[in-house]
Amino acid sequence: MLDDVVATMVVLVLGVVGLAALLRRLDEGDKRIVVVAFIGHVVAVFLQIFIIQYVYGGGDIDGYYRSGVELANALRTDFEFIFPEAVRFFFHDAETNIPFLVFGGPGPTGSLTVIAAFLFYVLGDSLHAASMVVALAAFFGKLALTQAMVQGQSNRVRRQVFLATLLLPSVVFWSSTIAKESVIIAFFGAALLLLRPLVAGRFSPLRVALGAVCLVPVALIKPYVLLPFSLAFGAWLYWERAGRAGRVVSIRPASAVVGAAVALLIFFVVGKISPQFAVENLAKSTATSQVAGTRVEGGSNYQLREIGEDEPEQQTLQSQILLAPLALPTALFRPFLFEVRNPMMFLNALETSLLLFLVVRLLVRGGLNQVRMAVLGSPLLLFCFVFTIVMATAVGLATTNLGSLSRYRMPFMPFFVSLVLVLDGMFRDFRSGAPVRAPQTPNLAR
């Protein structure tokens, strides 16, 4: 018990030191949001462990803990032999010589188990300390993501993005324990910040290399996240590089080729690392997830349509695309209040209901055409829109439980809520007669 407390406090103190160093670069308004978010992530660590262990009676974190501690003990016993085997296992090598079963096997879950094992090895098997490391890494990753998104933006847009990325309750809660979503948001944010200069037309080999390295854990732990990222980042890169401040974007072949090349390269890499997410296998993989979900009993299960055990082999990409109009609103706005089955679902439904209200208000205030023009007029909003639409549709198709849905959608929620809040501010200005300031596009001719 004492070792657990000491390890957790050491991690927390190091986090505070890192926070203090970063706060020097922020203005007062941003500082308040960041400090509150930091405290929220720390509190959420203890809250989530308590809920999982004493309310739900267990969860995936138990598997990561038991198997991670076993692997950590093996590292302490024979580090020279186990360490390279664990690294190979992290990269999904099924031929490793680890002398016991690892939770999740050679795949995304197994990769996270290896990360957990290294944390337990360093932190003396402390679940709270390891979860604190993950939560603070996710926090700093989201802060990096925010910095990438707000470069060159007005103070109000900065505030809206900071709020959406750092203070959304579901995002804070689900990024504060040992989970795939928590780990990948940390690396994803760092990668986006490192690759952001590409969008502005500045190429740094070192930053690109480091950004690619940060995307490797994402590809190993949550590979499908890179598919919407490749499309969204390619669109952002093209839209900002092809545009000029105050002008309509024109089709520039060179910029279009660069954007498309980046997107196709990420698609190719993801397909090689995880063949189930290659374009030709997407329909089968999605249908397999849908069938697997029907085998699990639960009060919050849902099905977009009935699917038989033998149907995955017969699925086509077109058949899944036909379900997109149902999958997208499911991922964005469910559970609805009338679907609530427990207190956790109620809190989640409050958040999704508020977002649904804001989206409906946007459409009423500006109309679908004005929303479309606003999104197409801003590279930042276009990035958020493409990433949200593609990933939310994928999550809605592959998920069959409303409880799991709350966690699986966490990586795209900062972008979705940023999109909603920024558009809401723009249309509020429009209705009040104030000058409408869209998110800015840097003048690349400078």
Image (cartoon, rainbow, N blue to C red):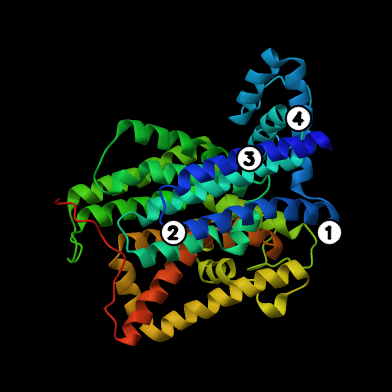
- Which circle's residue, 4 or 1, is located before the other in the chain? 1
Q: Give the amino acid at mark 2.
A: Glu
Quadrant of the rendered image containing residue 306 = bottom right
- Which circle's residue, 4 or 2, is located before the other in the chain? 2
**Can you give x and y, in whole percent of width and height, for residue 21 in the image?**
48, 42
Q: Which residue is mark 1?
A: 55
**Can you give x and y, in whole percent of width and height, for residue 92 in the image?**
61, 31
Q: CA distance from mark 3 to mark 2?
A: 22 Å
Front-lying residue, 387 or 28: 28
Q: Which residue is mark 4?
A: 124
Q: Give the amino acid at mark 1.
A: Val
The residue drawn where x is 53% and y is 58% is 166
Give the SS element for disc 4.
loop
The residue drawn where x is 73% and y is 74% is 340
- Which circle's residue, 3 or 4, is located before the other in the chain? 3
Front-lying residue, 63 or 167: 167
Q: Which residue is mark 3?
A: 13
Q: Are marks 4 and 1 in contact (CB under 8 Å)?
A: no
User: Tag 2: Cα neighbours inside 10 Å, few (<14), some, or many (≥20)?
Assistant: few
Q: CA distance from mark 1 to mark 2?
A: 39 Å
User: Tag 1: Cα neighbours inside 10 Å, few (<14), some, or many (≥20)?
Assistant: few
